[in-house]
Image (tube, grey):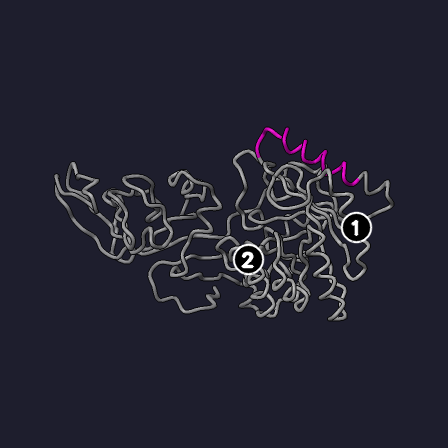
Amino acid sequence: MSTKMQQIRPAWLEIDLDQLRQNFALIQAEKPAHLKLLFVVKDNAYGHGAIEVARIASEAGIAYLGTVTVDEAVALRNAGIQTPVFVMAERTIEELQVCLDLDLTCCINDLDTAAAYAKLAKKAGKRPKVHVEVDTGMSRYGVRWKAAADYIASLQKMTELELEGLLSHFAMSDELDKSYAHLQLARFQEVLDELAKRGIDIPIKHMCNSGGYLDLPQAHFDMVRTGTLPLGVYPSRVCRRIEGTAPIMTLKTRIAALQQIEAGDKVGYGMRYTASSPRTIAVLPLGYGDGYPRIRNAGEVLIHGKRAPIVGGNAMDAMMVDASDIQGVSQWDEVVLLGRQGDEEITVRDLADLKGSVTYDIINGWRSRIPRIYLDKEDERR
C-alpha cells in the first residue's frame, strides 16, 4: 500500500488506484477501437484527487483530460501532466491567454470571443485547438443548434484557430426514458448534416457523458466524455453495467470512544435518540463537517463486517452508532462508512438516499480535512 502522505487523523478516504487501472482497462477493452476517451477530472476528480487519478488515466491512453475551470487545468500542468486538456464551459479573455500559454483546448461559442482569441493567437504565433458546443436542449452553454452551422462557417474563416471539435451535452441519458436524449441526438445530427452539405468536416465529434456511453452507442461519434464511470460510480440505477468495474473510493474511520448507556439515556444534540435498554454506543470522530450527510437516527456503518445503525443526530465532528450487537468491539477498531467490509457494502447511492441527493453530491462533498490515502501496488513495484 502506497499512501503518498502521512496519515495521522483516524478518519480517511482510501482511493484504490489499482482498481482505477482495472476500470480503465475494462472500458478500453469493450469500447470500439476508434473511440477516444475524455476523462473528466473536474472538482478534484469528483473528490478523488485530480492529480493522482489523472496520472493513471494518462497511463491508460486517454485522449483528453477534462476540466471546467482554468485553475483545474493549470494544476494539472503544474503537476507535470502533459496529456491534452479540454476546458469546458465559457472563458474570459484573461482565461483565454492562459489557455494559449498552456496549450489548453477550450470552447469558443461566439464570434466576439473567437475574434479576441484569434488576435491573441496571432500575436503569440500559435494556432490553438478549439471546440464548439451546440446547445441541443440543455439550455446551458453553446450555440443553439439552429444557428450552429452558420456560426461554424464563420468561425472557420478565422484561420488563426484550429477547429478540432464539435460537441453537445445530454440533459438526461442514463434513465430508461431516452426520448429527450433521442431528440437532442437528432438535433446534433441535423447540424452535422448541414455542415456536410457545406463541405465542413470536424475531426472530433462528441456528445456522450458516462450515461450516453453506456446506453446510447449511436451517439458515440469520435469521442465520449466519461467522468464517474472510471471511478466505479454509475450515473443511475438502470444504466448498463460493465462487469468487473468497482468503486475506487472507501471512507473509513476508527472508534474513538465507547459509551455504555442505560435505558432512558439520550444520545446526541437535540436528544433525538432515547435508549430503550442498555446499549453500547461507539463514537466515530467525523461528522457533517467532513461531508457526511447530516442525518438523525438513519443510516448504518460497518464494524467487524456487520452493520451498526447510526443513532441520534450526527454532529459536525462526531457521530454515534449502536454497536451493542457487535461482538468484541473495542476502541480504535476500524469502521467503514462508504465501501465494503467483509461481505457487507455501503454504496455511494445509499448515502445519497440518506441525504436526499445524488451520488455526485456525495463523492464531491468530502471536505479537504479528510485525508486521501492512495493505494497503489504498481507504484510500490517500481
Residue 349 pos. (x, y %): 45, 41
Residue 356 found in image quarter: top left
Residue under the image location 77 percent in, 54 percent down: 163
Closer to us: 57 or 203: 203
Residue 181 found in image quarter: top right
- Relative to 154, residue 93 above or below: below
Mark 1 vs 2, N-terminal side: 2
Q: Which residue is mark 2?
A: 18
Count neighbours of disc 1 (C-alpha within 10 A) and say few if under 14, some if 14 to 19, many if 20 or more.
few
- Relative to 350, residue 249 above or below: below
Count neighbours of disc 2 (C-alpha within 10 A) and say few if under 14, some if 14 to 19, many if 20 or more.
some
Closer to us: 115 or 335: 115
Main structural element of the magenta stretch: helix, strand or loop?
helix
Residue 176 found in image quarter: top right
Q: Which residues are magenta?
A: 175-192
- Under circle 2, the secondary element is helix
Residue 229 pos. (x, y %): 57, 47
Residue at mark 1 to residue at mark 2: CA–CA distance: 47 Å
- Under circle 1, the secondary element is helix
**Which labelled disc corresponds to residue 53?**
none
31 with respect to 89 (left or right): right
Residue 235 pos. (x, y %): 54, 41
Kindly identify the amino acid type of the residue bearing the numbered disc 1: Ser
**Which labelled disc corresponds to residue 154?**
1
287 with respect to 39 (left or right): left
Residue under the image location 64 percent in, 42 percent down: 169
Kindly identify the amino acid type of the residue bearing the numbered disc 2: Asp
